[in-house]
Image: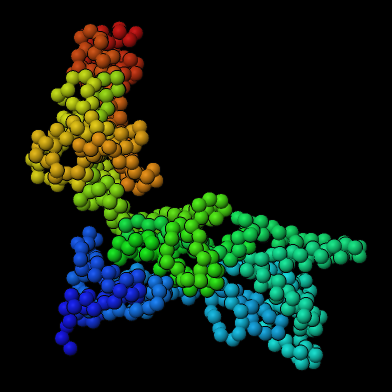
Amino acid sequence: MPQVPIEIQLSSLPNNPGVYQFYDGENKILYVGKAKNLKKRVSSYFMKNHEYGKTRVMVKKISRIDHIVVPTESDALLLENNLIKKYRPRYNVLLKDDKSYPWICIKNERFPRIFPTRKLIKDGSEYYGPYTSMKTVRTLLDLIKSVYPLRTCNYDLSQEKINSGKYKVCLEYHLGNCKGPCEGLQSLEEYNQQIVDIREIIKGNFKSSLHYFKGQMKALAKEMKFEEAQRIKDKIDVLENYQVKSTIVNPKINNVDVFSIVSDEAFAYVNFLQLSHGSIVRSHTMEIKKKLAEEDKDLLQLAIVEIRERFKSESKELYLPFKVIVEPHLKVRIPKLGDKKKLVELSERNAKFFRQERFKQISIIDPDRHANRIMAQMKKDIRLSEEPRYIECFDNSNIQGSNPVAACVVFRDGKPSKKEYRHYNIKTVDGPDDFASMEEVVFRRYKRLLEEKQPLPQLIVIDGGKGQLSSALKSLNELGLRGKIAIVGIAKRLEEIYFPEDPIPLYLDKKSESLKIIQQLRNEAHRFGITFHRNKRSKAAINSELENIEGVGEKTAQDLLKTFKSVKRVKEASIENLAQTVGMAKAKKIYETFH
């Protein structure tokens, strides 16, 4: 069958909600997407110039377009999720269907056992979860076992076998961890009532268990059975203590899913909190690798479907940071204040912490990916035409106008390259003139790089505001480099970023990694310059003390310091020792000056 031109395929698309699929010339699936209006959405790919490179590449590869019409946009969202997992298209975000999460199993048997498992067996047993860590499961099971005596053996406790006396109680019975149903010492009704209460505890509802135990404790106290009443009180304390630890919001907030998202150039992180009776019963963060510069809105709604399906959530209410399309039966809230708003903020904090941890791990395991991400972020934040892989930063130092010097520090891939740092003595400027000093040092630096045919940086950072930036620009103009190298100034007071010929500064987020890199550059240049300046002043002070002696000039002072290492040792030296360096006549004058 001959290939139908894309224009004709587009013209035949309906204006209905649905899912579209892009295929290349070899009939391999490239991308699956959803749309409120299939014709408008799919046509948009071919009617504009895409800034993001991967999108441009994908559009060039599209040879065939398939579509599936569905009744509503929320139906399209569900279908999109299923098709992405089924076909795993190259340009879609990757949604992993991880089966290895732990569950709590209430076994389908007489006198049910309760235990953790990673395998789901369809035998009628109840499974609660999945949980995001085995630690959470063990903590919950330890709580249950400390309150309810349950059997741990795997015997078949049919009524016939119990009546025949086939089993004998084990050590768990003698330790008080089991009531001995294997010998008929605990009724099935009593044991099953425990299971009913345990189900509620797993769901986060402690109300029925606390009510039951408090009633039991009062009854035992009335009968003067104080030791047994105390044991029941201990169980109440365990339950209440666990409840206090797990309840972080209003207990009236019940059966709610909370979602939030944070993202950067390459990845998005979606956090999910599941609440039951005011307690967080589950927290999970999903990392999503971006493929086509997807928006947070699209990634969040895709993640909601995936996470709810993965964790078998039956909550009917969602708290979200912004409006997205969800299934029609779900109620969505965008909280503005109060406990509900705090929950969304808590979820967002969890996503940020997860992101930071991933950055730390990646910076160790995969430093190239870490550098690539930071460089891409800096390019976006500082509005550069290319990634600033090579950055230079300049700073002047002239404390009280003396010994003016400057420093140039170099960063490669966001990290200091200390072997490339350079100091500069200011030669053409008299007195403390920061603007003229900056003009001189920038001119000298790039004149030399041009003469030696060395690579130029992608970004220059000037420590200072508009004045210092203007001075640096004069030198770049003179060298014909204006417009060939990006240059910005950073003012100390409010950390404003200044651009050439733009009176309005840029204020980056205080937690922005781009700002942190620029601050690190500025601080490193300042430290390097100050160290050089102090050393220079110190040497000048030492030389001047010796040069104040009649007959001792700069050359003699340097010879003395080279031999004796310090002014203190010169002062302590004998005439004979001094004479070996400067001769007897000068040695006598030096000795008499200090003695």
Q: Quadrant of residue 38?
A: bottom left
Residue closest to the eye, 535 or 166: 166
Query: Where does the image place residue 521, in percent across and percent down from the top left?
Result: 30, 40
Above or below residue 71? Residue 266 is: above
Task: Give residue 473's position: percent from left, percent from top.
Answer: 16, 35
Q: Identify the residue shown where x is 13% and y is 34%.
A: 475
In this view, which residue lies farthest toward the front? 15
**Closest to the observer, 336 or 408:** 336
Relative to residue 269, is residue 176 drawn left or right? Answer: right
Residue at x 79% of width, y 63% of height: 214
- Tell me the quadrant of the picture where the C terminus can be found: top left
**Residue in the image at 43% along x and 60% along y:** 323
Q: Position of residue 543 (x, y in %)?
A: 25, 18
Would you say residue 393 is visible in this rendering? no
Q: Quadrant of residue 446?
A: top left
Total residue callouts:
0
| Front-most of residues 20 and 148 | 20
> Can residue 221 be seen?
yes
Asked where in the image residue 584 lies, by quadrant, the reply is: top left
**Spot occupied by residue 44 in the image (x, y as percentages of width and height):** 24, 67
172 or 398: nearer the eye? 398
